[in-house]
Image: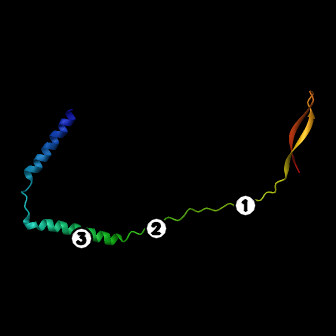
Amino acid sequence: MRKLAAAVLATSFLVGSLVATAPEARADGGQIAAGVAGGLLGGVLLGSALAGPRVYVAPPPPVYYAPEPVYVEETECRLVRKRYWDDYGYRIRHVQVCD
């Protein structure tokens, strides 16, 4: 709490000293305002001229190379029914036979 009070007190002294030493406001016929506006406008024009036009350049497309096709000769396989004996009788099972 003391730090907050000290910060508020220091800020109030700073603002008070600025107000006490500030000169009185004068317009001088608008000459200062015209100079500020002219300087800002000139800076904007000069900055935009030096920056040049913004041209949007699209990034290059991603590079993709399709893999080479692979040809594999597959053997012909088929399912064949085989009989076998399992001590209880003959049973039939399907066996894959490849030529």
CA distance separating discs 1 and 3: 64 Å
Tell me where residue 92 sits by quadrant: top right
Q: Left of 13 or right of it: where is 93?
A: right
In the rendered image, which residue does mark 2 sit on? 57
**In percent of the image, x 89 and y 41: which residue is there?**
81
How many residues crowd around disc 2 within 10 Å: few (fewer than 14), some, or many (20 or more)? few
Foreground residue among 51 and 17: 51
**Furthest residue to the top?**
88
Q: Amino acid at mark 2?
A: Val
**In percent of the image, x 85 and y 47: which residue is there?**
78
CA distance separating discs 3 and 2: 29 Å
Horizontal and vertical percent for residue 67?
A: 68, 60
Q: Amino acid at mark 3?
A: Gly
Numbered label attached to residue 42: 3
> Mark 3 vs mark 2: which is more N-terminal?
3
Q: Secondary structure at mark 1?
A: loop
**In percent of the image, x 41 and y 69: which residue is there?**
55
**What's the coloring here?**
rainbow
CA distance separating discs 1 and 2: 35 Å
How many residues crowd around disc 1 within 10 Å: few (fewer than 14), some, or many (20 or more)? few
Tell me where residue 46 sits by quadrant: bottom left
How many residues crowd around disc 3 within 10 Å: few (fewer than 14), some, or many (20 or more)? few
Q: Left of 55 or right of it: where is 24?
A: left
Which is more foreground, mark 1 or mark 3?
1
